[in-house]
Amino acid sequence: MEGIPARARGYAACAALGSLLCTLPPGPRTPWWAVALLAGLYAGGERIARRRFAGTLHPVLLAGAFLLEPAAAALVPLPGALFSHVERRPFALRRLWRAAQASLAVWAASHVHGALGGRDAVAACELPRALVPAGAAVLVFCAALALLNGGMRALAEGLPLRRVCRGLFLRSLAPLAVHGLAGLMTAVLWRSPYGPLAALLVLFPTAVSWWVFAQYHRERAAHQATIRALVQAVDIKDGYTRGHSERVGQASVLIARELGMDESRIEMLRFAGILHDVGKLGVPTRLLRKDGPLTPQERRVIELHPEYGHEITRGIAFLGEARSAILHHHERLDGTGYPYGLSGGQIPEPARVVAVADAFDAMTSTRSYSRARPVGAALEELRRCAGAQFDPRMVAALADAVERDGWHPVVTADETRTAVPPPARTPDDRSGARR
């Protein structure tokens, strides 16, 4: 169980115990052949889905919630989850957790579906009347998975529970709504004169959608690999700022979320933050690692790195607007920045986001030329420079997010940084910081 904190292991054990209690006792009229058929279908499909599609057979689980009593429905995911493909250790614990959270979510969805008369509507094949109970069950299923997984991430990674749960719920709601419709169609056909065999045909379109998603997943993985390779190259060359790129990407996401940007834009800003210093690959290593002050000529060479970064990423089409942030993240609102001296609204919005995130991490990290500043002092310095150097909206968004949830920086293998709680507001903490 290496790598997983004791509190997270305890949480998984409690979830497993809860799922075991949910399966007891199944009713005397439980159709065991239906439980076995759904469980077998889920188990077989799960092995394929996990290896090929990076997904899971939620339509089968939801069909079980619509067809069976809660205790019986909670049994459907157990064989497939307990014997599913797991890539990382500890294998047994991860399988147990996967089984427990799926079982609890299905049990909760089945309870809500039955309480709203959903099983009677499915048995009568009254599709319009069955939509409301099915929709409520899908919402509960989604909320249960978000709460369980959010709790695990909060305990294992130290992330804020509310923010994690909200993000998981919003990201999974649309896919699960589609899976819920597929599960409802399966359940209605199952109860119709056509029987279970016809019901299983509904899963073929679902398999096609999985294939499409798998292609997207592979393309996304290729994007991530490209970015990781570039960031590792920068970290090797400029060892003093190892981990800086990931943290700037993280802070950029905080700002974007606080401003209410959509998920595609948030992802773009994460890429922009991570790659903002990729142009340092074109700067001589001796300048990046120099301990003393830079001469004016050396500073001019280093100030070419945004243009180098823009050229390096020119052929990476998926970056989109991120390239403008790479080029302009050292511009200032007052027009005294570089490389082009843009001012105010001339500076692209992604660049204004990354500029604040970059300065915040630079001030809160120890460098060869400066000691790390407290988070509160860094925020005060950003506020002081807002309007002249930084966009006040971006500064306010970062400050609100950090003061509410704290700053939990990404940690690299070479670092021993710890998460920082929300800073206390101290009006007299106005020590200077590098910008």
Image (spheres, grey):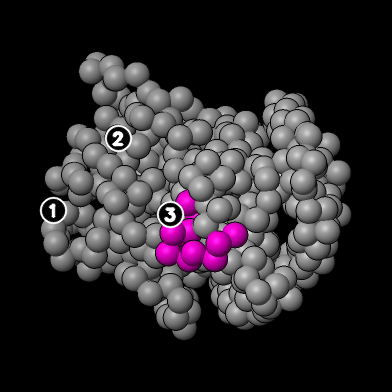
Please say whether residue 420 is visible from this viewpoint: yes
Q: Residue 130 magenta-drawn?
A: yes
Q: Is residue 392 rendered to the left or right of residue 302?
A: left
Q: Amino acid at mark 1?
A: Asp
Residue at horizontal 45 percent and vertical 76 percent from the top: 318
Residues at marks 3 and 1, CA–CA distance in whole angstroms: 56 Å
Q: Is residue 152 above or below residue 61?
A: above
Query: Residue 132, which numbered label?
Result: 3
Which mark is first along the chain, 1 or 2? 1
On the image, numbered disc 1 is attached to which residue? 334
Q: Position of residue 146 (x, y in %)?
A: 54, 44
Q: Position of residue 311 (x, y in %)?
A: 42, 78
On the image, numbered disc 2 is attached to which residue? 400
Front position in the image: 52 or 2: 52
Residue at horizontal 29 percent and vertical 51 percent from the top: 260
Q: Closer to us: mark 2 or mark 3?
A: 3
Give residue 236's quadrant in the image.
bottom right
For the N terminus, the image quarter is top right
